[in-house]
């Protein structure tokens, strides 16, 4: 059966003035429903696929005959029987007919299809065989990527490989978000502090907050990569706590992290992946906020003369020294940052711009892991006012 799909592309006047046309150009593709999809038998199909040491497994096939060379989505389906009962898909999608399937992804799909929940169940299954392998049935599913084309799905023939599987788990990835919760927000996740990712440093996050010191009912704080009590929060027991604040001490307050002195601090979280587990380090630094660049006369270092005045109350504002006038251009603009130092005086976050921010629309706008921010200027003798509790910022 043949169907005609009419794809219409309109010329854009904004691209090339010489290509302006009042008439649409038409591309007609002859589509037909394919009746055959061939997955080739691998060169080493009669050998043994030791997935723990394989790296990748290669499969090749011919594109189904859609009547034209279509861009397709291909998925790999595996099962432990030729009827493909309880089958599972490899997580990746492919777009070429010669694919290298990640052996770990293939092993995960096999575990799902077989219902294996640990390595012991795999070892038991292998022990029941004379070859020390299990047959795995593999087939490929194809469909045209263009969502406008429907009914293009087709499944290939199945092949069998002899595999030594292993209990595979998905890779552990660094959290992309981090939140701080505690007495400062009445232990309410809706008002918790979303920490800022450090540019070029996956696993590092920071925020500026006022925390009451001491121990007692409700005192202290915790952290989590989710903004909820989902079981992955961490406190004193799971955290190595270090500080460069003179005289500041940490305490375990019923699992919460408590500090000995009230005040504004920079809280920095370091996450290290050890095996499949996260190791957490809390760094507490003085709340030093700096003016950088043209607004301070062109100094791109940590100049104590250009530190913000630190408030003494939880709702207070950080206030900068009076600024030199800037135009808001690349080389003549206002720049601000934290730039905390470790005990050995090495920069905790690397370059200063890894932790910079600006004021936009009366809000503190953090660079985080993103690109350059909009350039902002200021008048002579104006000051920057920052309220890290509310996120409000002003230049006045």
Image (cartoon, helix red, strand yellow):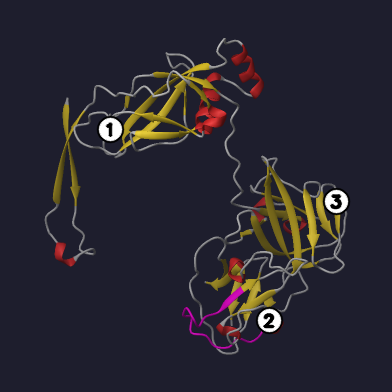
Image marks 3 and 2: residues in contact by CB distance under 8 Å: no
Distance Cα–Cα, label 3 vs label 2: 37 Å
Distance Cα–Cα, label 2 vs label 1: 63 Å
Image marks 2 and 1: residues in contact by CB distance under 8 Å: no
The residue under the point 29% across, 24% down is 37
Distance Cα–Cα, label 1 vs label 3: 60 Å
Q: Secondary structure at mark 2?
A: loop
Q: Position of residue 57 (x, y in %)?
A: 45, 30
* Screen quadrant of the C terminus: bottom right
Residue tagged 1: 150
The reply to whether the magenta stretch includes residue 323 is yes
Residue tagged 3: 253
Mark with earlier residue (2, 1): 1
Residue tagged 2: 303
Image marks 1 and 3: residues in contact by CB distance under 8 Å: no
The residue under the point 26% across, 22% down is 36
Q: Which residues are magenta?
A: 321-336
3 vs 2, front mark: 2
The residue under the point 26% across, 28% down is 64
Q: Position of residue 73 (x, y in %)?
A: 35, 35
Q: Alpha-carbon neighbours of circle 1 within 10 Å: few (<14), some, or many (≥20)?
A: few
Q: Which mark is residue 222?
A: none
Please determine whether, in this image, residue 385 is positioned above or below residue 132: below
Q: Secondary structure at mark 1?
A: loop
The answer to whether 98 appears left or right of 378 in the picture is left
The answer to whether 87 appears left or right of 153 in the picture is right
Mark with earlier residue (1, 3): 1
Q: Determine the image quadrant of residue 307.
A: bottom right
Does residue 66 appear in the picture of this structure? yes
* Screen quadrant of the N terminus: top left
């Amino acid at each position: 059966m043949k169907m005609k799909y009419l794809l219409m592309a309109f010329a854009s006047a904004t691209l090339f003035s010489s290509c302006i046309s009042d008439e649409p150009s038409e591309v007609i593709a002859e589509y037909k429903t394919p009746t055959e999809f061939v997955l080739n038998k691998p060169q080493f199909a009669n050998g043994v696929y030791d997935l723990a040491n394989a790296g990748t497994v290669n499969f090749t096939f011919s594109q189904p005959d859609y009547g034209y060379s279509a861009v397709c989505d291909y998925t790999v389906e595996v099962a432990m029987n030729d009827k493909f009962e309880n089958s599972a898909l490899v997580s990746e999608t492919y777009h070429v007919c010669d694919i290298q399937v990640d052996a770990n992804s293939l092993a995960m799909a096999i575990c799902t299809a077989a219902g294996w929940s640990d390595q012991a169940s795999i070892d038991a299954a292998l022990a029941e065989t004379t070859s020390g392998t299990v047959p795995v049935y593999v087939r490929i599913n194809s469909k045209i990527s263009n969502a406008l084309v429907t009914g293009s799905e087709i499944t290939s023939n199945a092949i069998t490989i002899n595999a030594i599987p292993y209990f595979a788990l998905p890779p552990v990835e660094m959290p992309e978000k981090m939140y701080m919760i505690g007495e400062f927000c009445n232990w309410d996740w809706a008002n918790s502090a979303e920490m800022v990712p450090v540019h070029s440093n996956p696993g590092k996050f920071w925020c500026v907050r006022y925390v009451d010191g001491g121990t007692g009912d409700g005192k202290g704080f915790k952290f989590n990569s989710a903004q909820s009590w989902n079981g992955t929060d961490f406190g004193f027991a799971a955290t190595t706590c270090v500080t460069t604040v003179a005289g500041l001490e940490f305490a375990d307050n019923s699992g919460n992290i408590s500090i000995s002195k009230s005040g504004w601090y920079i809280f920095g979280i370091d996450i290290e992946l050890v095996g499949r587990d996260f190791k957490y380090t809390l760094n507490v630094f003085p709340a030093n906020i700096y003016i950088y660049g043209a607004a301070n006369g062109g100094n791109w270092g940590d100049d104590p003369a250009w530190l913000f005045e630190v408030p003494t109350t939880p709702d207070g504002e950080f206030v900068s020294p009076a600024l030199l006038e800037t135009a808001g251009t690349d080389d003549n603009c206002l720049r601000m940052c934290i730039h905390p130092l470790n005990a050995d005086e090495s920069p905790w976050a690397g370059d200063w711009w890894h932790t910079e921010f600006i004021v936009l629309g009366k809000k503190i706008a953090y660079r985080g892991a993103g690109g350059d921010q909009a350039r902002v200027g200021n008048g002579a003798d104006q000051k920057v006012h920052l309220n890290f509790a509310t996120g409000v910022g002003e230049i006045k």
